[in-house]
């Protein structure tokens, strides 16, 4: 049956609903395809979006869904939601995959949708799987027809739509973010696959909770991966004399090797480096080391991580402990000198040092505040006392006149203006009382007493 349905699907003669049924009834189809949910009630997880009374659930049940983008990691249920919508909607449901479609195909589907609406009063829901794979020209073809209601667009994407889908198309769609499933939720799906006749329910097979928990953990919240591991472990488990198969933890471990979801140009890249930086900023060395290990294990470029540590040693620690920048730079040099795996040790040392160091972002605030004045205020000339005197003859122009050499004064300090008159009262750098910066704060207050008001 499946071969026949796939042939018709390729030639445009079958909908997603029929295709889902064909997969579900074909024993040769992958377990993950056979176990796709048929109703909202069968969808596991995503309670924030699909729980009772939630917006997405209400509009699906009322068949009032407007253009939407389902966004989330693999195996979180984006395409499964499309199958559910295909079963519940009275609209014509037209699925395409962005990898295999082109502008001509999109135009043909839109023309059919226009005729369907004009002559039969039937809406068309156009489901574009992996919509981030459409180039800008292909996405632009869709835009006017989404705007005028010729099609209701549902896009599914693992890429952040705010990066990978044109802003005009995103602005006309509601973005629904799906999250990775919890271990308990994946275990619900695995147990269902063992019991349901669509899955392994007729195969006389079982597995312990510990085995299922292992499969759920290595899937990292990806239901498709979990079902693939379960199916492979089942296939590799020989039946006993009675024909019964018990999937052991060893069989599951052999079938499922943990794969860390990571894309150097995708969300995981930016989200993990963000978590790493925020852990250092938040003074949690354990969290910082955990995210460092996650990134290194997933194959992140260690030089990129080292560069971020150099930046954040200056940005988050600053003069509260100036040695943090030295440690970070040393770690970056170690990455170049020895490489992985040994470089992970100085990298860990730097991450821990930055995390436990006292914190100050006073230097960041200083340069930001000064840059704002540079952009906003009149750019007056350098005052004459501060101008360069190294070129012969410039002293006759007044360069350096009135300049007081600090080393000629007690303590190497003397009060004199160092900026143009229009910004002479500005204070950009306001040190905190954290770590070494407390000493800096004390000195500045002593030097500029009566001239500048430091906190």
Image (cartoon, rainbow, N blue to C red):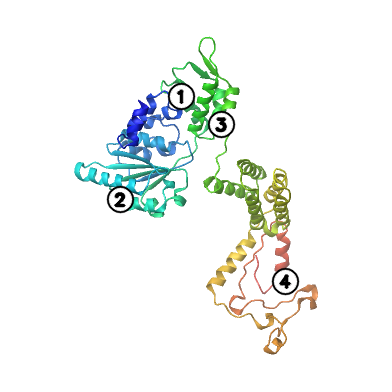
Image position of 97 (left or right of 233): left
Q: Residues within 10 Å of mark 3 (few under 14, many from 20)?
A: some
Q: Which of 298 and 192 lies nearest the eye of the viewer?
A: 298
**Residue tagged 3:** 217
Check the image and name the residue furthest to the top. 241
Label 2 and label 1: CA atoms lie apart by: 40 Å
**Residue tagged 2:** 145
**Mark 3 or mark 4, which has the lower sequence index?**
3
Label 3 and label 4: CA atoms lie apart by: 60 Å
* Quarter the N terminus occupies: top left
* Quarter the C terminus occupies: bottom right
Image position of 72 (left or right of 174): right
Label 4 and label 2: CA atoms lie apart by: 68 Å
Q: Position of residue 371 (x, y in %)?
A: 57, 68
1 or 4: mark nearer the eye: 1
Q: Residues within 10 Å of mark 4 (few under 14, many from 20)?
A: some
The tag on residue 193 is: 1
Label 2: which secondary element: helix
């Amino acid at each position: 049956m499946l071969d026949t349905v796939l042939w018709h699907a390729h030639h445009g003669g079958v909908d997603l609903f029929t295709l889902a049924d064909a997969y579900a009834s074909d024993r040769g189809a992958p377990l993950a395809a056979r176990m796709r949910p048929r109703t909202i009630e069968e969808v596991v997880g995503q309670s924030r979006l699909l729980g009772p009374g939630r917006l997405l659930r209400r509009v699906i049940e009322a068949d009032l869904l407007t253009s939407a983008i389902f966004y989330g990691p693999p195996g979180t249920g984006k395409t499964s939601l499309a199958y559910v919508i295909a079963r519940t909607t009275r609209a014509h449901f037209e699925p395409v995959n962005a990898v295999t479609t082109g502008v001509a195909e999109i135009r043909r589907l839109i023309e059919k949708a226009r005729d369907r609406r004009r002559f039969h009063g039937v809406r068309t829901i156009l489901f574009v799987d992996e919509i981030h794979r459409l180039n800008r020209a292909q996405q632009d073809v869709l835009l006017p027809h989404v705007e005028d209601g010729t099609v209701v667009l549902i896009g599914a994407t693992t890429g952040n739509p705010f990066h990978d889908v044109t802003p005009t198309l995103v602005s006309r769609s509601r973005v629904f973010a799906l999250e990775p499933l919890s271990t308990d939720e994946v275990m619900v799906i695995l147990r269902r696959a063992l019991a349901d006749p669509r899955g392994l329910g007729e195969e006389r097979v079982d597995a312990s909770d510990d085995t299922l928990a292992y499969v759920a953990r290595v899937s990292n919240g990806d239901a498709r991966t979990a079902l693939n591991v379960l199916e492979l472990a089942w296939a590799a488990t020989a039946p006993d004399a009675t024909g019964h198969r018990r999937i052991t933890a060893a069989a599951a471990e052999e079938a499922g090797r943990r794969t860390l979801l990571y894309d150097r140009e995708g969300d995981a890249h930016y989200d993990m480096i963000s978590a790493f930086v925020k852990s250092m900023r938040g003074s949690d060395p354990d969290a910082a080391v955990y995210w460092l290990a996650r990134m290194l294990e997933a194959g992140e470029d260690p030089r990129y991580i080292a560069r971020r540590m150099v930046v954040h040693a200056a940005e988050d620690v600053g003069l509260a402990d100036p040695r943090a920048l030295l440690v970070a730079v040393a770690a970056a040099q170690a990455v170049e000198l020895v490489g992985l795996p040994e470089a992970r040790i100085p990298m860990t040392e730097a991450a821990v040092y930055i995390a436990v160091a006292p914190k100050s972002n006073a230097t960041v605030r200083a340069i930001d505040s000064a840059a704002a004045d540079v952009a906003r205020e009149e750019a007056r000339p350098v005052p004459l006392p501060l101008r360069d005197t190294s070129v012969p003859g410039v002293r006759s122009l007044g360069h350096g006149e009135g300049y007081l050499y600090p080393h000629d004064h007690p303590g190497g300090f003397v009060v004199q203006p160092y900026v143009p008159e229009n910004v002479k009262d500005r204070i950009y750098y306001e040190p905190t009382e954290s770590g070494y910066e407390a000493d800096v704060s004390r000195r500045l207050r002593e030097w500029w007493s009566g001239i500048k008001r430091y906190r």
